[in-house]
Image (cartoon, grey):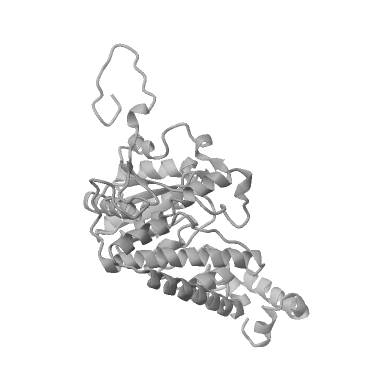
Amino acid sequence: MTTTTTSQVIHEPCFMDGDEFHIATFALLQQDGTLFEGAQAPELDRETARRIYHTMVLIRVLDERMLAAQRQGRLSFYMQCTGEEAAVIGSAAALDDEDMIMAQYREQGALAYRGFSIDEFMNQLFGNAEDYGKGRQMPIHYGSAKLHYMTISSPLATQIPQAAGYAYGQKLDGQGHCTITYFGEGAASEGDFHAALNMAAVHRAPVIFFCRNNGYAISTPSVEQFAADGVAPRAFGYKMHVIRVDGNDVLAVYAATREARRIAVEQNQPVLIEAMTYRLAAHSSSDDPSGYRSKKEEALWREKDPVNRMRLWMLAREWWSDDEEKALQEQLRREVLETMKRAEKRPPPPLASLVEDVYAEVPARLKEQLDALEAHVRRHPEAYPKSAPGLDQGGA
């Protein structure tokens, strides 16, 4: 036999279709903010709970304001996390600060929880001189070395095998850290997903594969993506630990991810988490969801709002109040607006930064191209209102 386990020998053809692998959904918190009967909340102290909730509200406010800015023509592109805050922020809170996060493009909440400031978000969104990526990436492609958050890349699912490789390095390093990689159920249909899970399972890499199953791969519903019971059963093909969780239940997400991290770090085993949630917003600022789903469907999921669910739980424990809610909303709306205005006024990165960071010394051919570009901008300053002043001030 060539399998890795001893297989029973039978003498009649017996086929299996996967129904044997139905996976239940782990949930703790009901929509009214109370626990299900028999459920036990994870060990979550007041300070951490308030930090999680503050981050959830921040992301909701940031998303609303930045989509409005895109509609006003002040920003070229944006993607919201609306409806998926519990899945993203609850899982990030369950990690250690030095664990690596490799995100897809809707996990700004994980970065905000780590301490990425509104200023840092705005600098990236507007690609100004203080943007860590020097304006080379389109909006929402955040990254932070100090916060162990790998810079977002546009190609779908490439971060998944990268996470498996990085986690294998963490295993060899022996410092007790792991990697979490986020992706949607649409990305789980890419070949990179399967290659990553196989590599992680074979090499026992401490990586958490976190699938945000939000129901749609842009406009394609889950029922048209795969015939099986979601993404979670695929873990059995790789002999991998797996759990399905209510992605709108922040307590369940936190508890599941905390245990997944323990398995990853202590046992050097990969874990797959499928968080069942819903994208309340459009796929991106370029998408119109009315073309593929109904308002009635959206309304049903708005009743399952993860932010409101946690707020009710916090109120019941007297860890939060209506007055604090009002003050926080007002503070964040004011802060986001003021920070955005500052970021818009900052100059763009200097033109010379276009040819930096690839070679130790700028090659002659790139220097020639840069000189030609600068000469062109000087000849047509009216066409380059942001870059031309920098040249005149010696900022090239």
Q: At 48% across and 52% down in the image, what residue appears? A: 302
Quadrant assignment, res 380: bottom right
Q: Position of residue 312 (x, y in %)?
A: 36, 59
- Judge left or right: residue 157 versus residue 374: left
Image location (x, y in percent) of residue 133: 52, 69
Q: What is the count of numbered marks?
A: 0
- Vertical arrangement, residue 250 with respect to residue 315, above or below: above
* Residue 82 rendering spot, x and y as whole percentages: 49, 57
Q: Residue at the location (63% across, 76% down)?
A: 351
Q: Quadrant of residue 19?
A: top left
Q: Position of residue 192 (x, y in %)?
A: 46, 44
Find residue 233 and report its image quarter. Answer: top left
Q: Name the quarter where the N terminus is drawn.
A: top left
- Horizontal side of residue 140 vs 273, given as left or right: right
- Work out which residue is located at the far top of the displayed protein and give it: 12
Quarter that holds the C terminus: bottom right
- Is residue 317 shown to the viewer in this render? yes
| Residue 166 visible at all | no
Nearer to us in this view, 113 or 85: 85
- Along the viewing direction, whichever of 145 and 184 lies nearer the viewer: 184
